Image (cartoon, rainbow, N blue to C red):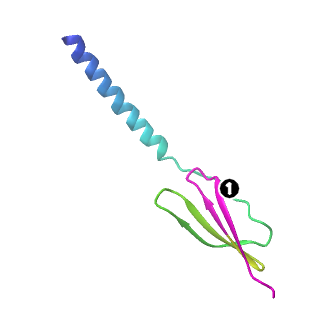
Amino acid sequence: MAIMIVAALVVIVVTIYSRLTAMEQNAELQRFEISLPAGARVSSASIGENGQMLLLIEQDNRQQIWQFDRPGRLERQIEIRTSTE
């Protein structure tokens, strides 16, 4: 019976320790670089609930919307062009 109590306490301590270390690792600052085309500028940026980021890029006669996921990978790129007609 004593062995089961000790084993249960060890499981509880290990679980608490692993959750605390996981929280510390997630709290680290995340950095990544975004390369813009020449002459482009970011006119707007926003971050969603799930950590997704949206950038509105303006360049000459067009705009682009770039959507990044939480780890910083480009998921979607939408281009909006102004008609010259």
Q: Is residue 49 above or below residue 79?
A: above
Residue 68 lies in the magenta-colored region: yes
Residue at (51%, 46%) from the top-left corner? Answer: 28
SS type, badge 1: loop
Q: Tell me which residue sits at (48%, 44%) in the image.
A: 26
Work out whether residue 58 or residue 28 is closer to the camera in this orientation and state it.
58
Please provide percent x and percent y for residue 56: 64, 71
Is 66 above or below relative to 63?
A: above
Give the image quarter of residue 53: bottom right
Q: Residue furthest bottom?
A: 85
In this orientation, which residue lies closer to the viewer: 11 or 80? 80
- At x 28%, y 17%, the residue is 7
The quadrant in which the C terminus is found is bottom right
Whole-percent x, y for residue 58 in the image: 71, 75
Drawn side of residue 24 relative to residue 83, left or right: left
Find residue 54 and report its image quarter.
bottom right
Residue 35, placed above or below residue 81: above
In the figure, 36 relative to 33: above or below?
Answer: below
Question: In the picture, which quadrant includes the N terminus?
Answer: top left
Residue that sits furthest to the left in the current view: 1
Q: Is residue 82 left or right of residue 28?
A: right
- Apparent side of residue 27 relative to residue 30 in the rendered image (left or right): left
At x 26%, y 21%, the residue is 8
Residue 62 place in picture, x, y as percent: 74, 77
Q: Residues within 10 Å of mark 1 (few under 14, many from 20)?
A: few
Toward the front, the furthest residue is: 85
Q: Amino acid at mark 1?
A: Glu
- Decide which of 27, 76 is in the foreground and name it: 76
Q: Position of residue 19 (x, y in %)?
A: 38, 36
Magenta stretch bounds: 65-85
Residue beneath label 1, please?
33
